Amino acid sequence: MKLKFFTYVLLLFVFKQTIVMSENLDISVYTGTFDVIDKEGDDQTTLVGVEHRNTDLFRNTFLGKVAPVSGAFITGKNSLYFYTGIEGQYSLGPMNISPSFTPGYYDKGNGKDLGSALEFKSEVKVGFDIFKDSNLGYSYSHISNNDWGSTNPGTDNQQLTFSTRF
């Protein structure tokens, strides 16, 4: 129990330092459904989360515009997921498409056992610019452990996302 608490405090401290050190913040808040395709019928629940991108770290590469992304969410059954990874950003007029890959730490709480503390999230977001520096979108993600855990049931999630830059 003390180790879990220490881990959460350490992760929050790291995220806080990343956010405080940045002058150009891109913050997203989201809410949605955890385990949309719940075959057993007992793990589907809500989720809420926050995500951070530092616009100073965006890079144009041969794959397009990419940036590091970090975030966390909690489900209605107290499952937690802290993650960090990379996100691509592609704009088609007012529409933005953002695929991402983010390894992270998962704690099942009272929710779904994904088989491992190390989980990988792949996600695709589609959003539309609604105001200057603000975006409203939909995202779909899959989280699994690549069969590295004791089990690998995975989970598919969908969220509504609001992003803004400060």
Image: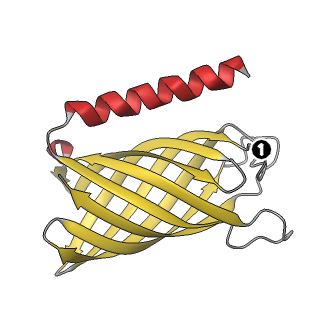
Alpha-carbon neighbours of circle 1 within 10 Å: few (<14), some, or many (≥20)? many
Position of 58 with respect to 110 (left or right) is: left
> Does residue 6 lie above or below 120 as drawn?
above
- Number of numbered discs: 1
Q: Secondary structure at mark 1?
A: loop
Q: Amino acid at mark 1?
A: Gly
Q: Which residue is mark 1?
A: 115
Q: Position of residue 112 (x, y in %)?
A: 77, 53
Colour scheme employed for the rendering of this structure: secondary structure
Residue 139 lies, in percent from the top left, at 46, 70
Q: Is residue 64 visible?
A: no
In the rendered image, residue 12, in percent from the top left (x then y), is placed at 46, 31
Q: Position of residue 131 (x, y in %)?
A: 17, 74
Please tell me which residue is depicted at 35% across the width and 57% down the height of the picture. 28
Give the residue drawn at x 68%, y 37%. Answer: 117
**Which residue: 84% across, 65% down?**
42
